[in-house]
């Protein structure tokens, strides 16, 4: 009996990876604008690197934990999709709250929450390619993810400029206030992230642990017989 993992179509791979577009919107908005938000709220330039320690430290802690948990998870939503779902909701809320932070320390706390939430969503996305695709298609899956990462990074990084130059939204504000161009960029990015991740959740199925075990046994058998 052949238990090889089914080959997926181009559009099935597209749907499976589409959520990465939203994840990259979150990362790009964070990387491109959070320092500006910190400075607006009173941070000295010399203090910004300390405030940014949240990003690498959070990723270092969260990614292996989420990777382990998602390997052991199976419920009505599946294996990886529960993490997509809750991570996307938390990241969306963070993107709405961050540009409205009333003080520097709230903004710094939101950076921790936002980075942790993005990592909750992102880490299982990478694993989904290995779960759903046979070996011969995994390079295509990772390439598709890279495509969406690139598109998301370029568009999201340019959003404040687009808001100002295309939609005439103010890029300046009184001292201590975040400009509307930044606020609306975060709002738009939050919507894109939620829609993109939910698109993957509702268009992509996952294999049960039993099915994955059967596929892995078949791959191991094929490798031994090669």
Image: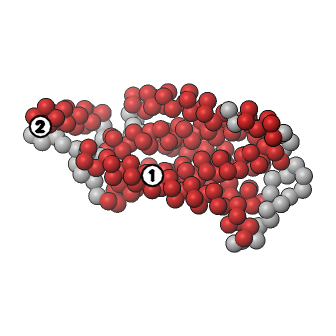
Q: Is residue 204 left or right of residue 118?
A: left
Q: Is residue 84 visible?
A: yes
Q: In this view, does 48 lie above or below 145?
A: above
The colouring scheme, among rainbow, by chain, secondary structure or one colour, is secondary structure
Instruction: Rate crowding at label 2 as few (under 14), some (14 to 19) or many (20 or more) other CA atoms within 10 Å.
Output: few
Q: In which quarter of the image is the N terminus?
A: top left
Q: Which of marks 2 and 1 is nearer the N terminus?
A: 1
Q: Position of residue 221 (x, y in %)?
A: 14, 33
Circle 2 sits on which residue?
Answer: 226
Q: Which residue carries the number 1 mark?
A: 146
> Residue 14 shows which numbered tag?
none
**In which quadrant of the rendered image does the C terminus lie?**
top left
Q: How many marks?
A: 2
Q: How far apart are marks 2 and 1 (CA)?
A: 31 Å
Say whether residue 68 is left or right of residue 6.
right
Mark 1 element type: helix
Q: Residue at x 75, y 61 (%)?
A: 181
Q: Is residue 105 visible?
A: no
> Residue at position x 16%, y 40% from top?
3
In the rendered image, the vertical position of residue 193 relative to residue 4, given as above or below = below
In the rendered image, residue 72, in percent from the top left (x then y), is placed at 39, 28
Residue shown at the point (56%, 33%) measured from the top left: 59
Q: Residue furthest front?
A: 46
Task: Point out residue 208 in the picture as x, y percentages from the top left corner.
Answer: 30, 37
Assess whether mark 1 and mark 2 are in contact (beta carbons under 8 angstroms): no
- In x, y percent, where is residue 201? 44, 49
Name the secondary structure under disc 2: loop
């Amino acid at each position: 009996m052949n238990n090889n993992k089914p080959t997926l179509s181009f559009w099935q791979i597209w749907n499976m990876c589409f959520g990465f577009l939203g994840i990259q919107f979150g990362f790009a908005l964070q990387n491109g604008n959070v320092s500006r938000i910190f400075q607006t709220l009173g941070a000295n330039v010399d203090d910004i690197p300390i405030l940014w320690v949240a990003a690498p430290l959070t990723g270092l802690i969260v990614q292996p934990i989420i990777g382990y948990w998602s390997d052991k998870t199976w419920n009505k939503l599946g294996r990886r999709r529960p993490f997509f779902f809750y991570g996307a909701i938390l990241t969306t809320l963070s993107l709405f709250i961050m540009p409205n932070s009333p003080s520097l320390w709230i903004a710094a706390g939101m950076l921790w929450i936002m980075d942790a939430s993005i990592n909750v969503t992102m880490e299982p996305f990478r694993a989904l390619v290995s779960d759903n695709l046979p070996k011969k298609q995994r390079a295509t899956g990772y390439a598709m993810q890279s495509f969406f990462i690139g598109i998301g990074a370029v568009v999201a990084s340019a959003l404040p400029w687009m808001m100002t130059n295309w939609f005439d939204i103010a890029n300046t504000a009184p001292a201590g206030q975040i400009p509307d161009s930044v606020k609306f960029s975060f709002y738009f990015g939050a919507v894109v992230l939620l829609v993109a991740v939910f698109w993957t959740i509702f268009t992509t199925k996952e294999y049960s642990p039993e099915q994955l075990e059967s596929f892995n046994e078949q791959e191991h058998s094929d490798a031994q017989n090669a």
